[in-house]
Amino acid sequence: MNRLLSAVALAAALLAGSAAAAPSQDPMKMPAGTYVLEKTHASVLAKVRHLGLAAYTMRFNSFDASYVWDPKAPEAAKVTVTIDVNSVDTGDAKVNAKFADEFLDGKNHPKATFVSTGIKQDENGFTGAMTGDLTLRGVTRPITLDVIFRGYEAGMLGARSGFSAVGGIKRSDFGSTNLSSFVADEIDLVIEVEFLKK
């Protein structure tokens, strides 16, 4: 019985220590390698104004991403993202189909992709701007995302990193002609992702 209690106490102490340890916010301490998306802790949201009032929020339920990192050459980091535009989720099945078809042209172009072309870190090291080519509705345009490096940690759940990113695009830049006062041209992107080191 004492051995069992000791084992439980040891496990609790290890878990508490792991939970208490804050991730490193120094990207230079993140090991080189390929990092793949941890899909259970990731979200891609798009917000568009309806009638100039509420920011109508949509979530994409199916997407994947990865990046290659080398602390000796952070500006050369390569990020790739693929989104199934037909997985758009507004909370209403009829609206989902309408958005996927009319605004995203999901029948002809079911995938949207993003490939980074450059990363510029701010002086603090953990914030910066990432430029890249977004392909949506079969049209490719350069966009910029403001990125925050949330940290890296190698704990009991595996070596992982986290990022937040925000940016904006215009539907008209990607061939969307369904423009009206009901749905704004501008779309805000909000991204929260965790990655696991391969």
Image (spheres, helix red, strand yellow):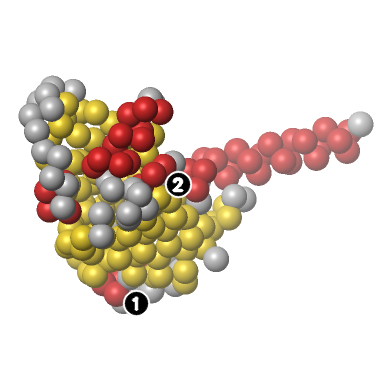
| Foreground pick, 161 / 11 | 161
Identify residue for label 2.
62
Image coordinates for residue 20, horizontal then vertical, percent: 52, 40
Alpha carbon of mark 1 to alpha carbon of mark 2: how far?
33 Å
In which quadrant will I find the C terminus? Answer: bottom right
**What residue is pinned by disc 1?**
72
Name which quarter of the figure residue 141 lies in.
Answer: bottom left
Viewer-closest of 88 and 11 = 88
**Residue at (23, 35) in percent of width and height:** 47
Percent across and percent down for residue 22 are: 45, 46
Residue 142, image quadrant? bottom left
Rendered-image quadrant of the N terminus: top right
Q: Amino acid at mark 1?
A: Lys
The answer to whether any part of residue 150 appears in the image is: no
**Count of numbered tags:** 2
Quick check: 93 above or below 109?
A: above
**Closer to us: 177 or 147:** 177
Residue at image point 30% right, 42% down: 101
Crowding near pointer 2: few (<14 within 10 Å), some, many (20+)? some
Extreme residue toward the front, this view: 108
Task: Please report the residue visible at 20 percent of the width from the left and 48 percent of the height from the top.
Answer: 167
In the image, residue 8 above or below residue 36:
above
Q: What percent of the width, then of the height, locates residue 30?
A: 42, 64
Point out the frontmost of discs 1 and 2. Answer: 2
Residue lying at the far bottom in this picture: please name it.
72
Answer with left or right where residue 98 lies relative to residue 61: left
Q: Are marks 1 and 2 in contact (CB under 8 Å)?
A: no
